[in-house]
Image (cartoon, rainbow, N blue to C red):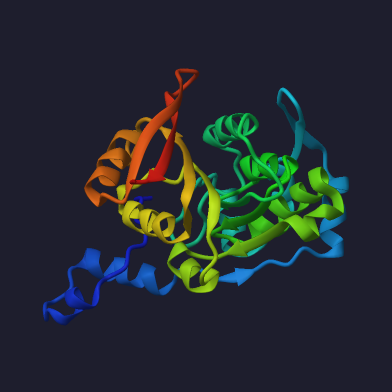
């Protein structure tokens, strides 16, 4: 299956009369079908989901994060997301964006966040959260964390139960959970801004870069920072940290630096982005 991702078509482009190509038609259909925004509210039954399944653990220096394995909760899924997982597909554009899998970059970022200075005054956002490991580390350090994933099912069956497994009932006060496509997110966050934005394995396709940078520009506080964990190169797809850094430089809003590199398995990095002074 080809990797095709969502992008916005500007009004200026729409104003030019031309016969759409087959590729343009497919892209337009994807834009129409993206997941709508919704806030997933933590409920009483979410508190007990993790009790029904065997949990995995990420052992850090000062804490241990317990989380559900996607393969277990998949049995509770229905519809298109269930179909994607049954066919062993990591990603189906505009349907499922890989949230049931714990990616290496998420673990890298969780370990890195453990060493940050985080307090109860810290407002954090994790984009494309999946299991939510980096955001949970920030929350255990006291931060108030908003979690976003493309699929509401991922939040309901993975992220929210993982929050309760680690934070208990503090989840209600410390965390919010948003589902839907990034193109819908800014309209609903309104004027909210964050000290820390976390995201991992979200730059696998360059088509998404401009939209991701718009979210950073709109949501990051003046003195805040973005931490982005990703593979140096996503073979067969085209994205990676070098290409993303090129787009950051071209955009001109942020300065970036590599703050972590590992050669374990596929080479991975963590980039730090800050507003240019």
Q: Left of 59 or right of it: where is 213? A: left
- Which of the 4 quarters of the picture holds residue 30? bottom left
Tell whether 65 sits left or right of 110.
right
Q: Nearer the viewer, residue 177 or 154?
A: 177
The answer to whether 242 is drawn above or below residue 222 in the figure is above
Q: Quadrant of residue 88?
A: top right
- Residue 169 position, x and y percent, is 86, 54
Q: Position of residue 105 (x, y in %)?
A: 52, 34
Residue 55 image position (x, y, % from top left): 79, 37
Q: Position of residue 199 (x, y in %)?
A: 51, 45
Decide: is 245 above or below 144: above
Q: Residue furthest top?
A: 263
Q: Nearer the viewer, residue 198 or 17?
A: 198
Residue 100, visible in the rendered structure: yes
- The residue at the point 82 percent across, 53 percent down is 170
Whether residue 234 appears in this view of the structure is no
Image position of 51 (left or right of 194)? right
Q: Is residue 187 above or below residue 117?
A: below
Which residue does the image show at 75% across and 47% down from the upper left? 162
- Residue 74 left/right relative to 207: right
Q: On the image, which quarter does residue 71 sit in?
A: top right
**How many numbered circles are shown?**
0
* Residue depicted at x 47% and y 68%: 186
């Amino acid at each position: 299956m080809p990797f095709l991702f969502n992008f916005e078509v500007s009004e200026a482009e729409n104003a030019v009369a031309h016969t759409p190509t087959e590729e343009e038609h497919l892209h337009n259909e994807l834009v129409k079908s993206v997941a709508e925004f919704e806030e997933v509210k933590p409920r009483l039954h979410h508190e007990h989901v993790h009790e029904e399944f065997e949990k995995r653990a990420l052992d850090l220096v000062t804490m241990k994060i317990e989380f559900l394995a996607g393969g277990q909760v998949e049995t509770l899924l229905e519809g298109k997301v269930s179909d994607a997982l049954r066919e062993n597909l990591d990603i189906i554009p505009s349907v499922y964006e890989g949230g049931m899998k714990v990616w290496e970059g998420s673990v890298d970022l969780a370990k890195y966040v453990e060493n940050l200075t985080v307090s109860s005054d810290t407002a954090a956002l994790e984009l494309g959260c999946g299991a939510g490991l980096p955001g949970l580390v920030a929350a255990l350090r006291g931060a108030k964390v908003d979690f976003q994933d493309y699929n509401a099912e991922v939040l309901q069956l993975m992220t929210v139960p993982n929050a309760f497994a680690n934070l208990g009932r503090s989840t209600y006060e410390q965390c919010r959970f948003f589902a839907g496509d990034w193109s819908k997110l800014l309209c609903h966050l309104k004027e909210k801004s964050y000290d820390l934005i976390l995201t991992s394995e979200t730059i696998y396709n360059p088509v998404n870069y401009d939209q991701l940078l718009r979210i950073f520009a709109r949501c990051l506080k003046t003195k805040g920072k973005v931490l982005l964990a990703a593979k140096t190169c996503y073979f067969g797809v085209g994205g990676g940290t070098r290409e993303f850094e090129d787009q950051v430089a071209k955009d001109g809003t942020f300065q970036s630096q590599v703050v972590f590199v590992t050669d374990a398995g596929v080479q991975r990095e963590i980039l730090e982005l800050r507003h240019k002074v």
